[in-house]
């Protein structure tokens, strides 16, 4: 049947074929002074760590995490990140993972990065966590992106729920 990685990808994509929507989840568990650390799940299966900006009562553009809640994810096929990722991840890129419907926020993306300065209010993903940073971000992105993009291009709805634990 092929390598373990291929079997896992096939399994994930096969399950998505039978679901009308895909559910992503971020469980924020470390609320620090300048950043927030969490865990990322696809259909309740743990995938990687997350890093976001800190919570603020009054939003500071590009330096505040989005509120807890459930939002729709769509593919964004315009803008600088999209152009960059179309080259950087040419073999998998279909558009940026764009979190929509967030009150008073726009252009919230899921992308690579390792520390709070990389977030600009977006969600970063990484396979490892050391202190206030995440690592192996590109590997995490390459892990989560294909099944999410496949669901979206197949016409499924994708939602992400942010929980403050």
Image (cartoon, rainbow, N blue to C red):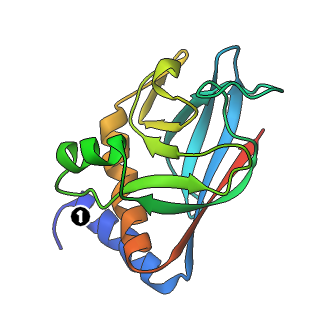
In the picture shown, does residue 17 fall above or below 147?
Answer: below
Residue appearing at x 24%, y 57% in the figure: 92
In the picture shown, does residue 68 fall above or below 115?
Answer: below
76 lies left or right of 99 = left
Residue appearing at x 35%, y 58% in the figure: 95
Q: Position of residue 46 (x, y in %)?
A: 53, 50
In the picture shown, does residue 8 fall above or below 21?
Answer: above
Q: Secondary structure at mark 1?
A: helix
Q: Position of residue 31 (x, y in %)?
A: 72, 24
Residue linked to disc 1: 6
Residue appearing at x 38%, y 64% in the figure: 149
Q: Position of residue 147 (x, y in %)?
A: 38, 64
37 lies left or right of 112 = right
Q: Quadrant of residue 11?
A: bottom left
Position of the N terminus by quadrant: bottom left
Residue placed furthest toward the right: 57
Tally the marks: 1
Position of the C terminus by quadrant: top right
Residue appearing at x 51%, y 29% in the figure: 119
90 lies left or right of 121 = left
Q: Quadrant of residue 88?
A: top left
Q: Position of residue 28 (x, y in %)?
A: 68, 37
Rate crowding at label 1 as few (under 14), some (14 to 19) or many (20 or more) other CA atoms within 10 Å: few
Q: Quadrant of residue 43?
A: bottom right
Residue placed furthest toward the bottom: 18
């Amino acid at each position: 049947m092929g390598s373990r990685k291929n079997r896992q990808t096939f399994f994930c994509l096969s399950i998505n074929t039978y679901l009308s929507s895909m559910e992503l989840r971020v469980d924020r568990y470390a609320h620090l002074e300048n950043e927030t650390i969490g865990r990322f799940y696809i259909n309740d299966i743990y995938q990687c760590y997350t890093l976001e900006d800190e919570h603020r009562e009054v939003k500071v553009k590009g330096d505040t995490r989005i509120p807890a809640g459930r939002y729709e994810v769509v593919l964004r096929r315009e803008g600088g990140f999209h152009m960059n990722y179309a080259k950087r991840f040419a073999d998998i890129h279909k558009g940026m993972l764009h979190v929509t419907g967030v009150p008073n926020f726009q252009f919230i993306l899921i992308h690579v990065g390792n520390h709070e300065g990389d977030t600009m209010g977006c969600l970063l993903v990484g396979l490892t966590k050391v202190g206030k940073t995440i690592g192996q971000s590109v590997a995490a992105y390459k892990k989560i992106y294909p099944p999410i993009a496949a669901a979206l291009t197949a016409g499924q709805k994708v939602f992400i729920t942010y929980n403050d634990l």
